[in-house]
Amino acid sequence: MRIVQKFGGTSVGSLERIRSTADIVEAELNRGNQVAVVVSAMSGETNRLIGLANEITDAPAERELDAMLATGEQVSAALLAIELQKRGITAYSFNGAQAGFKTDGKYVRARIKGVEAGHLMERLSANEVAVVTGFQGVDEKGNITTLGRGGSDTSAVALAIAVEADVCDIYTDVDGVYTTDPRIVEKAQKINQISYEEMLEFASLGAKVLQTRSVELAMRYQMPIHLRSSFDLVAGTMVSKEDETMERAEISGVAYNRDEAKITIVGIPDHPGIAANVFGPVAEAGINVDVIVQNVSEEGHTDLTFTVPRSDYHKTMQIMASLRDSMGARDLKGDNGVAKVSVIGVGMRSHAGVAQKMFQVLAGEGVNIQMITTSEIKVTVVVEEKYIELAVRALHSAFGLDLAVDSI
C-alpha cells in the first residue's frame, strides 16, 4: 500500500512527540507500505510567529506573513526527517515548493491549483520517506503562499491524490469522529465509518476534526481518509463514499456551532434584486452568510433574516446600517447570542419524519426555534445559545445515538 500520513501540531509539538510520530511512520514501513508524511507546525508556533509580526505592526504585509508562517512547518518536517534518518530510514524533508504544490496568489488563504509530485512518487517507489510541509505552496511567480488555518489537512489530501495513495491517514489528538461532542454528552459514540457528505456537514458545522476544504477535495477524488489518534493507536473513523449495501441509521450525529449571530433588516422595499442588494456588500466584505429567511411581502415591504459568524457580527451590522439608510428600511435588529444545532445523516433519504421528530423533541424541552434550514441529509435550527447543550443532549438521546454505533 501507499499511504500519506498527516500529523497535526500536537503530534509534533515536542521532540518527544516527534519521536512518537517517527515510531508510527516506522511501523508502517515495517508493514511493507510506502509512506509520505505531511506535518503541521509545532503546536503554538503559528500563533507565536503571528504575535511577533503583530509586535511590529497590526497590519503586516500578507506576502511577508506567509513567508514567515511557512517556516513553522519546515522546522517540523526537518526534525522528523532527522529523527527518521537517525533510525537508518532514508527520509528527506520537502517544503511546499520542493514538493510541487502550486497555488493561486491569494496570500494567507491560497487554494491549491495542482501538485507536481512525480519526483515524490519516485522516492516512494524506492521506499524512501518524503516528509512534506503542510499548509503551504508557491504561486506562479514563485511567492510562498499559505492555505489558511487547518490547511495541512488539505495539503495531505492533495498529496495523497497526487501520489496515487490508497488512503490518507490523518493523525490528531482525538481518535475519530463522534456522534456528538463527548464533552457535552458522555454517551457519545465513536463512528467507525462515515460518508464524505456526512463528514462535510460535520466539518461545516464547527466540528474541528477535519478542515472543510480537505473533505471536499477527498470527496471529489474519492480519496479515503482515516481519522486516527497519534496518542492512542487504535482504529479511528474511516471517511469514504457511502456504502449502498449498508442499512443506514436514521441519524448519524448531532452537531452544533456556537459561533453564530443573527441579523434582521426590517421593512425593506420588496422588488426584484433586493436580496442581491442586501447580500452583495456582505459578500464583498468576505463575510459568509449561512441561514437565510425572507418573510412574505406585505404592502411592498419584506424582512430579511440571516446568520453570520459571530466574529463578523459587528462588521455586518455596520454594513446593514448603511443599507438601512440608503434603502429606507424601517429597522435593523441583531442578536449575537444564538447558536445552531443540526441532526445529520444520509439515512434521512429513506426515513421520513426526521424534522418533525426534531421539532417535537425541542418543543418538549422548551427550546424555541428561531430559524430552520434543511438539506437532503441535514436539518439545522437556530436557537438561543443558552439552550444548546440541552438541545444536543435531548436530540442525541431521542435519535438513539446513546447506544453503541458500529457504522453510520
Image (spheres, rainbow, N blue to C red):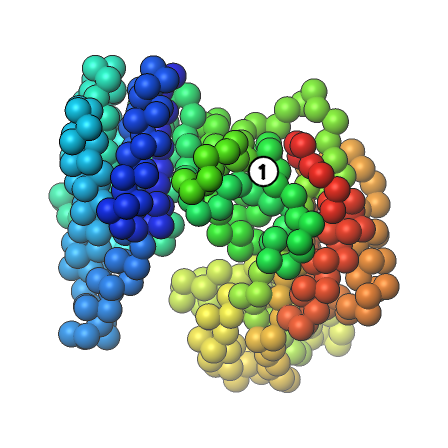
Q: Is residue 294 above or below residue 146?
A: below
Q: Does residue 136 appear in this view?
A: no
Viewed as shown, does residue 20 lie left or right of 389? left
Count residues near mark 1 (Cα–Cα under 10 Å), then give few for <14, some for 14-19, many for 20+: many
Identity of the residue drawn at 50% across and 33% down: 234
Q: Which residue lies under the disc numbered 1? A: 197
Q: Does residue 352 appear in this view?
A: yes
Q: Is residue 145 above or below residue 214?
A: below
Identity of the residue drawn at 63% across and 50% down: 180
Q: Position of residue 270 (x, y in %)?
A: 65, 70
Task: Check disc 1 and report its element: helix, strand or loop.
Answer: helix
Viewed as shown, does residue 11 lie left or right of 85? right
Viewed as shown, does residue 12 lie left or right of 337? left
Identity of the residue drawn at 17% across and 40% down: 78
Viewed as shown, does residue 219 lie left or right of 17? right
Q: Position of residue 173 (x, y in %)?
A: 44, 47
Inspect the image, locate mark 1, and give the three-letter code of the amino acid beneath it: Glu
- Displayed quadrant of residue 403: top right
Q: Position of residue 135 (x, y in %)?
A: 29, 46
Q: Is residue 117 above or below residue 316?
A: above
Quadrant (top left/top right/bottom left/bottom right) for the C terminus: top right
Identity of the residue drawn at 25% across and 54% down: 107
- Depth order, front residue of 104/48: 48
Count of numbered labels shown in the rendering: 1
Quadrant (top left/top right/bottom left/bottom right) for the N terminus: top left
Q: Is residue 244 above or below residue 344?
A: above
